[in-house]
Image: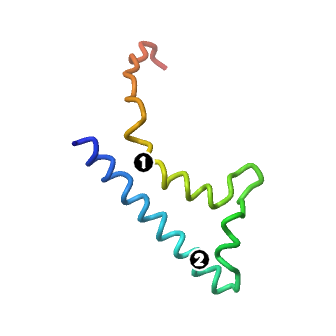
Amino acid sequence: MKEQNLAIDTFVPALRTLAGVLDKGAAHAREKGTDPQALLQERLAPDMFPLSSQIQLPAITPRMAPRAPPARNHPRSTSRS
């Protein structure tokens, strides 16, 4: 159960922040006379996903996290830099 609480404590604030940013972006678009829905297909750079995918990925991550395999323990490096 502790892992579940950690996931909730991690994902909920991040998703709330994302929702706040999207609300501000939608309000700004309306102020400028742009349809906020039209922005969902826009990309900041040609090699980036559209905004709709940028929103979808963090939204599905909390559902996928419990199914992810546990992290492996990696041996510490013995070399010093």
The count of marks equals: 2
Vertical side of 73 occupied by 53: above or below: below
Element type where label 1 sits in the image: helix
Q: Is residue 37 above or below residue 64?
A: below
Q: Bin the neighbour count of mark 2 within 10 Å (Cα to Cα): few under 14, some 14-19, many 20 and up.
A: some
Q: Is residue 20 above or below residue 13?
A: below
Question: The N terminus is located in which quarter?
Answer: top left
Q: Which residue is mark 1?
A: 63
Foreground residue among 74 and 43: 43
Residue 27 lies, with reference to residue 10, above or below; the image says below
User: From the viewer's perspective, is the residue at label 1 or at label 2 nearer?
Assistant: 1
Q: Residue at x 47, y 68 (%)?
A: 19
Figure quadrant of residue 78: top left
Query: Position of 3 compared to 47: left or right?
Result: left
Give residue 43's position: percent from left, percent from top: 72, 59
- Marks 1/2: CA distance? 26 Å
Residue type at the position of mark 2: Ala
Q: Earlier in the sequence, mark 1 or mark 2?
A: 2
Identify the residue at image location x=61%, y=80%: 28
Query: Please, which residue is most extreme toward the left here?
Result: 1
- On the picture, is 12 further left or further right than 41? left
Task: State the residue position of label 2.
Answer: 26
Numbered mark located on residue 34 in the image: none
Mark 1 crowd level (few <14, some 14–19, many ≥20, 10 Å Cα): few
Residue placed farthest to the top in the image? Answer: 78
Q: Residue 74 appears at what percent x and percent y?
A: 40, 20
Residue 48 on image: x %, y %? 70, 51
